[in-house]
Image (cartoon, rainbow, N blue to C red):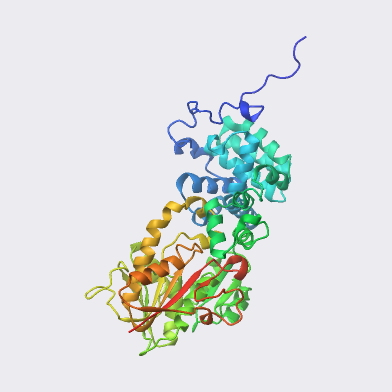
């Protein structure tokens, strides 16, 4: 008797049997021509129009991040605009994009188990589509059948050979809840607390260790309810939009009423924007406000509030001014104190951004290497009363805003960055006059970039400094500022990016 079932279509069936999912074979025709497994751009061109599909827009954004090292906050608005998405669909595309990027570590662990192979062996177009589908099935209220069906349809359009494979894998993913998958794929918290937190909260293990060290925690007990776990969880929450009401141009209460927001909890200049596109805020267009995290406002204002001895405080310096948010706030504060700001930026395009940001403020923009302090240089020695060093860093303090950064940064990035940080701090100490103050700021809690860089910079400087207590320079009543003298802000404690602040005074 003949078999009544229809013949098996190529690519259908168990994930392990799919011949297109990467077992070292020669790439299929659609993949040929790029060693990383992505299709040639010309092959994909007919499919580049999202046709108003928010899932396709999210896929293109995620793919651009992984394929082209793009930044989600830059590429996604362009894709949404090109697709002419309505507000509701744009919100869905944004949620899927940022959620998939944030949860990539957890998703990859689940997909590897469901596919019975490492995710590195899945063709990149299918891999990103699977991440998108798994995120919908496990982390959103989208029904599992809709998440599976829409993703399989997406794979059919972007990488047809993997259609059956994607269907089988996503059905396995959707068969279990997130908690059930975590129980299977995450190491036991008691045996490997770092590995457990890394999978549960979707961070590389080295960042988990860095957060635990900065928080002074021993994770040997498991760490499930620890401060470290709370800090990691905060990185997976969408970051609110904070506006800075420029002092002298608009106050926070007036701006909050104007935009339908609310005044900030800590910074006197902060306004929390409830939603919508900040670019549409009229106060930003006319130079009365700009987008800036409340933590950045706090550390900038701390420099302006620090006491300067031995003379007036009329000359201020921003050594790493791009793209201009802190320079703009400094300029507005300087205008109220009859002071001027020199804003230094080495990159030409970033210097242009600074110039645009500080228009109409008492700020002079200089394109130079801020480490070059000396006679005849753009930064004369001992010439400034206040100096801000907003040093380049890993950006681990802003992972909720830049979710792709957690997968791009590695410990190998630290030596070059910390060397630059210490050189900049040495230069800042040389640029400030005796009695003047320096604020060293990084958007990272990593101890090597914070306390260690400050200690090394002071040690290498030929000029004596004292480390001031930064806590009184922040608004009264701020909780959990630690023992001082430096301050580390945290998303889970303060609702800000994880900004670090150290304030030094140069001695005679």
In the image, residue 498 above or below residue 139:
below
Picture coordinates of residue 310 (x, y %)? Answer: 36, 90
Q: What is the total number of numbered labels drawn onto the structure image?
A: 0
- What quarter of the picture does the C terminus occupy? bottom left
Picture coordinates of residue 69 (x, y %)? Answer: 46, 49
- Most extreme residue toward the bottom is 311
Residue 154 or residue 414, whichever sits in front: 414
In the image, residue 386 above or below residue 190:
below
Picture coordinates of residue 342 (x, y %)? Answer: 35, 76
**Residue occupying the point 42% across, 52% down:** 412
State the image quarter where residue 307 is shown.
Answer: bottom left
Picture coordinates of residue 391 (x, y %)? Answer: 41, 66
In the image, residue 309 above or below residue 497:
below
Left-right relation of 70 to 135:
left
**Residue occupying the point 28% across, 77% down:** 381
In the image, residue 414 above or below residue 470:
above
- What quarter of the picture does the N terminus occupy? top right
Residue 290 visible from this viewpoint = no
- Most extreme residue toward the top is 1
Residue 298 or residue 198, whichever sits in front: 198
**Residue occupying the point 49% across, 82% down:** 249
- Most extreme residue toward the right is 1
Residue 444 visible from this viewpoint = yes
């Amino acid at each position: 008797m003949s078999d009544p079932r229809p013949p098996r279509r190529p690519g259908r069936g168990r994930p392990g049997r799919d011949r297109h999912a990467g077992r070292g074979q020669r790439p299929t025709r659609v993949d040929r021509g790029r060693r990383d497994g992505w299709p040639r751009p010309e092959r994909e061109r007919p499919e580049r129009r999202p046709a108003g599909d928010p899932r396709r827009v999210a896929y293109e954004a995620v793919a651009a991040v992984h394929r082209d090292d793009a930044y989600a906050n830059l590429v996604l608005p362009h894709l949404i605009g090109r697709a002419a998405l309505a507000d509701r669909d744009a919100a869905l595309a944004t949620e899927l994009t940022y959620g998939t990027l944030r949860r990539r570590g957890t998703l990859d662990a689940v997909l590897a188990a469901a596919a019975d192979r490492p995710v590195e062996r899945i063709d990149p177009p299918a891999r990103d589509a699977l991440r998108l589908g798994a995120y919908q099935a496990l982390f959103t209220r989208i029904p599992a059948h809709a998440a599976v069906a829409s993703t399989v349809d997406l794979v059919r359009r972007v990488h047809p050979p993997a259609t059956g494979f994607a269907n089988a894998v996503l059905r396995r993913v959707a068969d279990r809840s997130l908690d059930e998958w975590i129980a299977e794929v995450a190491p036991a918290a008691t045996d490997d607390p770092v590995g457990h937190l890394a999978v549960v909260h979707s961070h590389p293990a080295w960042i988990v260790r860095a957060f635990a060290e900065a928080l002074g925690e021993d994770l040997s007990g498991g760490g499930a309810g620890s401060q470290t776990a709370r800090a990691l969880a905060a990185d997976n929450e969408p970051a609110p939009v904070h506006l800075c009401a420029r002092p002298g141009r608009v106050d926070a209460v007036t701006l909050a009423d104007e935009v339908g927001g609310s005044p900030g909890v800590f910074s006197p200049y902060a306004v929390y924007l409830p939603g919508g596109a900040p670019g549409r805020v009229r106060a930003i267009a006319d130079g009365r406000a700009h987008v800036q995290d409340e933590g950045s406002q706090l550390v900038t204002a701390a420099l302006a509030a620090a006491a300067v001895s031995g003379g007036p405080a009329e000359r201020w310096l921003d050594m790493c001014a791009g793209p201009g948010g802190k320079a703009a706030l400094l300029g507005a504060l300087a205008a109220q104190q009859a002071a001027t700001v020199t804003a230094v930026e080495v990159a030409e395009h970033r210097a242009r951004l600074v110039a645009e940001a500080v228009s109409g403020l008492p700020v002079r923009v200089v394109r130079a290497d801020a480490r070059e302090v000396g006679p005849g240089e753009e930064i004369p020695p001992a010439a400034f009363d206040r100096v801000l060093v907003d040093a380049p860093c890993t950006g681990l303090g802003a992972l909720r805003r830049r979710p792709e950064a957690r997968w791009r940064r590695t410990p190998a990035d630290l030596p070059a960055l910390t060397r630059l940080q210490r050189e900049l701090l040495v230069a800042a100490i040389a640029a400030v006059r005796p009695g003047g103050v320096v604020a060293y700021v990084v958007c990272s809690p990593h101890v090597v970039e914070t306390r260690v860089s400050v200690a090394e910079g002071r040690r290498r400087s030929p000029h004596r400094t004292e480390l001031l207590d930064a806590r009184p320079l922040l608004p009264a009543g701020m909780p959990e500022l630690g023992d001082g003298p430096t301050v580390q802000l945290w998303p889970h404690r303060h609702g800000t990016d994880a900004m670090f602040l150290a304030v030094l005074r140069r001695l005679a």
